[in-house]
Amino acid sequence: MTNQSAAPYVDFATFLSRFFPGQKVQKITITAGFTCPTRDGSMGKGGCTYCNNKSFSPNYAAKLRPITEQIDKGISFFRKKYPEMKYLAYFQSYTNTYGEVADCIAKYEEALAHPDVVGLIIGTRPDCMPEPLLEYLSELAKRTFLLIEYGVESTWDKTLERIQRGHTWPESVDTIQRTHEAGILVGAHIILGLPGESREEMIAHAERLSRLPITTLKIHQLQIIRGTIMAGEYLRSPSDFHLFTEEEYIELCVDFVYHLRSDIVLERFVSQSPQELLLAPRWGWKNYEFTAKIRKALMPSSNER
């Protein structure tokens, strides 16, 4: 499936420009003190086998501070160069709808009360969207930009069980559909290279996700992070894992996009954890280099597909 526009796919910046024409908008990552059901004992302990939140939480959000303070510190990174920029408060770490509904709402409203915040992105799990909170978010979406980003991770239940995800693919399908029907923009997150999945099964993720009413998608490669359950599994049995080379991963991403619905916004293809936490794979390319190579490979003039 090719995209016949000037760009080979819709990127996140282009997507945001539809909502904020003529305005620069940047995400500010927030750690709001939530946990996860796979960490607090309700579904298990230790979290998903691949997860170490230190690998994606910026320094200014590493220690729990008031939400307004985190936003101010995040803005300080951009203010000198972009004084007119506005911001989306991104509730990223852990499961940001997992808690008392009133507490969740209070945290969202605190972020929205900041004069430079023009919307929210809320990262969560498909099994952590209670109906009362969804009703509030449905009303919230009528007055501000709102994107709910679900960690789907895999569309295969055998994989979700292996990585101790704690939810099923049918649960992801149901929650994404409920959220869309509530009038809320829906994003999804998928990991390519999880143990036990064949290349064909990874490509099938694209086809399955394309049947759902998702607006945005984040893709990234499996990373083996120190301090995770998966790191121990990898060290004990590395042959259970296929860690892509840079070239293999680019080829996989290109094929993945060709099987994906062409209007889905692609926010990213790769993620790079801090080197001190990353066990494998240790690639030499930067994120922007991957993106440039994938974009070039997807251009109609570069392919005969």
Image (spheres, grey):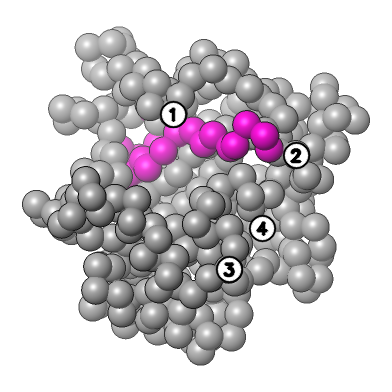
Give the amino acid at mark 3: Leu
Residue at image mark 1: 287
Q: Secondary structure at mark 4?
A: loop
Q: Secondary structure at mark 2?
A: loop
Asked if the residue under mark 4 is in contact with the one under mark 1, i.e. CB atoms within 8 Å, the reply is no
Query: What is the magenta segment's predominant secondary structure?
Result: loop
Q: CA distance from mark 4 to mark 3?
A: 31 Å
Mark before the other along the chain sequence, 1 or 4? 4
Q: CA distance from mark 2 to mark 4?
A: 26 Å
Give the amino acid at mark 2: Arg
Q: Secondary structure at mark 3?
A: loop
Front tag of 1 and 4: 1
Give the residue at x 45% y 83%. 105
Q: Which residues are magenta?
A: 258-277
Give the residue at x 24% y 67%. 116
Q: CA distance from mark 1 to mark 2?
A: 21 Å
**Quick one: 1 or 188, which is closer to the camera?**
188
Query: Does 30 appear above or below 264?
Result: below
Q: Position of residue 124 (x, y in %)?
A: 54, 63
Q: Position of residue 272 (x, y in %)?
A: 54, 34
Asked if the residue under mark 3 is in contact with the one under mark 4, i.e. CB atoms within 8 Å, the reply is no
Name the residue at the right extreme: 236
